[in-house]
Image (cartoon, rainbow, N blue to C red):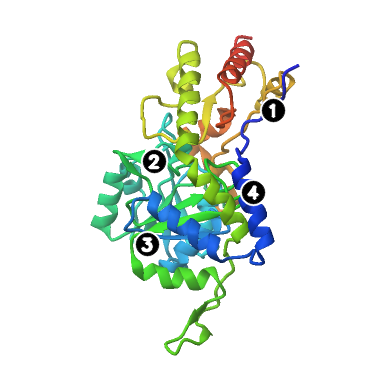
Amino acid sequence: MTDFLPFTRPTLDEATIAEVVAVLRSGWITSGPKVAELERALAAYLGGGRQVRVMTSATGGMEMALKAAGIGRGDEVVVPAMSFAASANVVVRVGARPVFVDVELRSRNASAASFEAALTPRTRALMPVHFSGLAVDMDPVNALAAARGLRVIEDAAHAIGTRYRGRLIGSFGDIVSFSFHANKNMTTVEGGALSFADPALALPLDRERFHGITKDAAGNVDVFDAGGKYNLTDVAAAVGIGQLRRLEEFNARRRALAARYHERLAPRLDPDQLPPAGDDGHAWHMYAVLVPFARLGTTRDGFVAAMRARGIGLGVHYPSIPGLTYYRQLGWDPEAFPNAARIGAETVTLPLFPAMADGDVDRVCDALLELMQR
Ligand SMILES: *Cc1c(COP(=O)(O)O)cnc(C)c1O
């Protein structure tokens, strides 16, 4: 019996573990020199000219960004119907209203045209989500935002290392939010980062991140806002420094594994069931396929259990947001977003992480194709 293959697993090397131990022994374990080092390393990775802040999660980062941008009660933010719930939850949490748009079936990304169709006089921001690490077509989205005076908060939770027209996501654009949750392409265990262009956001973000505290003109510590508490620890930052060192290598391995999945599955599945191939800027956070469970006489739970019995873990990313109970209760109709509804009903995420062997991809494809033939 071969080992169970989970749908994801972080790769933490011995050098990183040693750095974490060194921080634990150093006498300074919360936010300090390692946080500053990680922020400098991220800014350098993104090519300079950007403000970078790390925090305890991408969810916290997006909430801080919305607040710092002055978005709240009476405002609308356009959010894709296919994303993790956090993309919409953060909008609700600052008192604003998420307005959903459908995504394209294969890319799972929303287009500038769909964002434009959802604009109202109350729209203050757009939230493109680079789904699975495939860049949204950002030039028309940014052009739309510039023409209408809107902020753009990119949910780049899947997209650290993604390139759009040769440029790293987070190296340009208004406000870009990365996640370093344990399942993401790089991790700080839990954590996230914001990359932004506007230096005027730095002060409100720093205050929101840490109790509203900054130094006044005389150099005395003072509180200027009822700030929150989102600061990353040096222990977590040491993990992130070790991860960032290997990010390009990790993502290259993800791309190779995704190419192998595509090679095995493209001859056997309908193109609509497969993620799009051929974008070499794709960071391949996930490789997900659509499975017509009802037509196969099963359910997603039954299918997941059958794969598990063959030693393979699958994920589900994600149910459509308007179909979640909270958003239904707000009055959203999931059937109004047919692509998100179909993806939400039929998606399963196949194992994909840098430590996987080529043979693991073959094992997954053999089991998947066998179950899909019944
Ligand atoms: C993981 C994820 C988030 C939230 O990230 P956290 O760091 O866990 O808060 C937000 N949006 C998307 C699309 C995600 O996948």
Q: Amino acid at mark 2?
A: Ala
Q: Where residue 324 sits in the image (x, y, percent)? A: 60, 45
N-terminal-most mark, 4 or 2: 4
Give the camera-side residue of 222 and 252: 252
Foreground disc of the pair 3, 4: 4
Q: Which mark is residue 301?
A: 1
Q: Using the numbered discs, state the Cα–Cα distance from disc 3 to disc 2 in whole angstroms.
A: 20 Å
**70 or 211, which lies in front?**
211
In the picture shown, does residue 12 fall above or below 237? above
Whole-Å distance between the Cαs marked 1 and 3? Answer: 41 Å
Mark before the other along the chain sequence, 3 or 4: 4
Between circles 3 and 2, the one closer to the viewer is 2
Which residue, given by chain and number where applicable, does mark 2 sit on? 110
User: Which residue is located at x 33 percent, y 60 percent?
Assistant: 197
> In the structure shown, which secondary structural element does the residue marked by tag 4 occupy?
helix
Tell me: residue 163, above or below residue 203.
Answer: above
Disc on res. 122? 3
Residue denoted by label 4: 18
| Left or right side of 328 for 282 | left
Q: Amino acid at mark 3?
A: Arg
Q: Crowding at label 4, few (<14), some or many (≥20) Cα neighbours within 10 Å?
A: some
- Judging depth in this view, the residue of 201 and 40 nearest the camera is 40
Q: Secondary structure at mark 2?
A: loop
User: Where does residue 171 sit, x and y in percent of width and height?
Assistant: 34, 50
Amino acid type assigned to the residue bearing label 4 in the image: Ala
Mark-to-mark CA distance, 1 and 2: 28 Å
**If the image is split into quadrants, where does the N terminus sit?**
top right
Residue 273, compared with residue 342, is above or below; it is above
